[in-house]
Amino acid sequence: MFRILLLPLLLLPSTVLAEQAETLARLDLTRSSTGYAALIIFVIAYLLVMAEEFTHLRKSKPVIIAAGVIWGMIAWAYRSHPELAALPEHAVRENLLEYAELMLFLLVAMTYINSMEERQVFEALRARLVSSGLGLRSLFWITGLLAFFISPVADNLTTALLMCAVVLAVGAGNPKFIALACINIVVAANAGGAFSPFGDITTLMVWQAGRVDFWQFFDLFLPSALNFLIPAAIMHFAVPNEQPRAVEEAIPMRRGARRIIALFLLTIALAVGFHNYLSMPPVIGMLTGLGLLKVFGYYLKVSCQRRLQLGLARNNGYAAGDIVPFDVFRGVARAEWDTLLFFYGVVLCVGGLGFIGYLGLVSEIMYSQWGPTPANVAVGVMSSVVDNIPVMFAVLSMEPDMSLGQWLLVTLTAGVGGSLLSIGSAAGVALMGQARGSYTFFSHLKWTPVIALGYAGSIYAHFLINADLF
């Protein structure tokens, strides 16, 4: 009878045993050779990430290697303590689960964006703006406003690249306008991404961690808008008041484009519904939406083959875009895999440093000694130099005891703080390459005080408008 009662305990999975072992104190490795070595390795890896523009070494490579080395050293340090040996494995599995949810969520979003790009949704919008015949100041505001309102749904990098293409086409030969418009686009795209769970990876991380509900992000709309409008209003007077020659261009959207946009909105609704009403991870709704896109892609493929066989494109006047075949897996293949793998390295590296004990020390200094408001403002300034993904993941890993208003504040600052410098966000780095020679680090730096004024204004507006959340 004793053996029968003991049998379920023997069949318990290793994760449950690890959870029981979690009650034991972790080793404090912050002052050990393992801890110091882990810090040095992470710093070296991140310096290589920051030097990507010059070395052309993809940013995912150094952090992936650093993650493996850091956790290998941690596991080796725990070998001499058999009673705690299960803790590193359990911690790694938790980090992997967090990464898997975010990675699959982002993969679905990227697939939809790539599918819309393949159906020429963005090219059609660009062509309409280029041929509009508007003045430079009007285009300065239109591209900024579009970047602000598109980035909450599409990622800010895609939005910035699209608007920059318009600026380069219209402002060719006018480097001053290109520089000012690119600065405006970067600020607008980052600000627009800050008030939506889908606008930036950091907002997505905060939402999936359950710190802020979906609809509560929109309390940041007015502060985010001020972050964009204040510097834009000042830069407006520096934009040349000229009327460029309109470039006649018409690009039709391909067949199924509008339905893919509708499916994307439905997918977002599914993600929100699964999370808010069914208490399920949002990624389940996103993957369900990916399935809908795959089924619709199958319909487009089959119907395209029928049209080709019947010769409808030639005889019945169908446009060439109507019979272009659609393959959803091309959208998956064209996802930003380097960014997704970089995210893996960051999650594991920061998770390793947190397991060692460094995040606890940083949390004690920033959130206990400084206080949450100075700490969260500093997070935004840090994100102008260091990518906001590891910064936000570190904050979430610290688990500081903060009010909803403070969680919204760190979401805002981490999202818009990258606008202070051109290297502070993916949008800024990408536009420096796209508008090479016109939009540079120093052309952006010249307007940093004005952008900082918008940064301060957005923080003040958040405290004023959302005072009841603190």
Image (cartoon, rainbow, N blue to C red):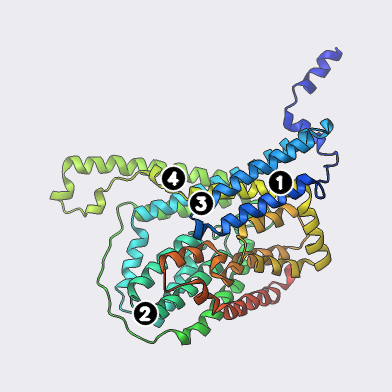
The residue that mark 2 highlights is: 174
Q: Do the residues bearing badges 4 and 3 touch, measured as CB atoms within 8 Å?
A: no
Q: Position of residue 319 (x, y in %)?
A: 21, 55
| Label placed on residue 290 | none
Q: Look at the numbered discs 1 and 3 and tell me whether their residues touch, using CB distance below 8 Å.
A: no
Viewer-nearest of discs 4 and 2: 2
Q: Residue at x 69, y 41 (%)?
A: 71
Q: Is residue 430 left or right of residue 230?
A: left
Q: Badge 4 is on which residue?
A: 332
Q: CA distance from mark 4 to mark 2?
A: 37 Å
First in sequence: mark 1 vs mark 3: 3
Q: Is residue 3 visible?
A: yes
Describe the element under mark 1 as helix, strand or loop.
Answer: helix
Disc 2 from disc 3: Cα separation: 32 Å
Report which residue position mark 3 lands on.
58
Comes first in the chain, label 4 or label 1? 4
**Nearer mark to the viewer, of 1 and 3:** 3
Give residue 352's mark. Answer: 1
Q: Are marks 2 and 3 in contact (CB under 8 Å)?
A: no
Residue 361, compared with residue 97, is above or below; it is below
